[in-house]
Each structure stands twice: as C-alpha cells, then as structure tokens.
Image (cartoon, rainbow, N blue to C red):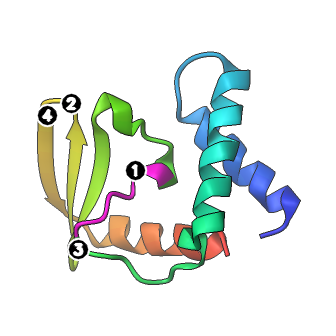
C-alpha cells in the first residue's frame, strides 16, 4: 500500500467515525498504520474469533466489534446489543478490504 492509498483508506475510515474530523483522521491513520506494522493488512484469510472492527474504524473501547465466526457467519456487537448474521457479502467484502491494504 503506497502513501496515497493509505490516505484514501484512512479518509474512508474517518468518515465512518463521529466527532472532530482531525481527531478522526488521526485515529484512522494510527489504526491503519498499526495494522500494517502488525502485518494484518497483508492477510487474505479471515481468522475465526477475531474482531475485525478496526477495518471499519469501530471503537473497541465503546464495545463496538465485528467478530468472524467462520464461513459466512459474523457477530456484530455494539455495547449490550449483539446480533449474529449469515452474510456471504460481508465475508467477501472483508477479504477484499484486507487484500486492498497490502
């Protein structure tokens, strides 16, 4: 991922967050850079039980998570609310999103 692609991705993540734009962009850039440093951005397979909320800029501190259950099953958590869905489109989009980061 070159710098331009990184900025575009960070901007997309920041648009999904709430609050001051400069703070959102800074958080998105830090999150994206941390995932690249860890090698997460080079993944092309999903790991069962892993929280992929960082891909969409979700705030783990607020209890926002998207957990992969395997196959096409996902669990979305927002505070006390929890919903499990079966969605091939979500799985495909997540894999493509992770591939685009590399």
Q: What residue is at 84 percent from the left and 67 percent from the top?
A: 2
Label 4, on which residue? 81
Kindly report the distance in space between the C-alpha atoms of the residues bearing marks 4 and 2.
6 Å
- Which quadrant would residue 91 be assigned to in this image? bottom left
Q: Quadrant of the C terminus?
A: bottom right
Circle 3 residue = 72
Mark 3 residue element: loop
Is there CB contact under 8 Å for labels 3 and 2?
no
Identify the residue position indicated by label 1 in the image.
Answer: 53
Find the distance from the CA under tag 4 to the CA under tag 3. 20 Å
Q: Residues within 10 Å of mark 1 (few under 14, many from 20)?
A: some
Callout 4 environment at 10 Å: few (<14), some (14 to 19), or many (20+)?
Answer: few
Q: Nearer the viewer, mark 4 or mark 2?
A: 2
Q: Is residue 45 left or right of residue 80?
A: right
Which residue is found at the position 57% from the left and 17% from the top?
19
- Measured Cα–Cα span from mark 1 to mark 4: 15 Å
In the picture, measured across the screen, residue 86 lies left or right of residue 59, that is left
Can you say which quadrant of the picture contains the N terminus? bottom right
Q: Are marks 4 and 2 in contact (CB under 8 Å)?
A: yes
Q: Earlier in the sequence, mark 1 or mark 2?
A: 1
Q: Which residues are magenta?
A: 49-54
């Amino acid at each position: 991922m070159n710098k331009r692609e990184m900025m575009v991705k960070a901007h997309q993540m920041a648009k999904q967050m709430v609050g001051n734009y400069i703070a959102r962009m800074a958080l998105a850039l830090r999150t994206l850079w941390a995932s690249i440093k860890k090698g997460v951005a080079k993944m092309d397979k999903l790991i069962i039980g892993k929280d992929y909320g960082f891909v969409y800029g979700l705030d783990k501190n607020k209890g926002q998570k998207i957990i992969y259950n395997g196959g096409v099953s996902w669990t979305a958590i927002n505070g006390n609310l929890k919903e499990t869905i079966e969605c091939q489109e979500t799985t495909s989009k997540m894999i493509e999103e992770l591939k685009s980061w590399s």
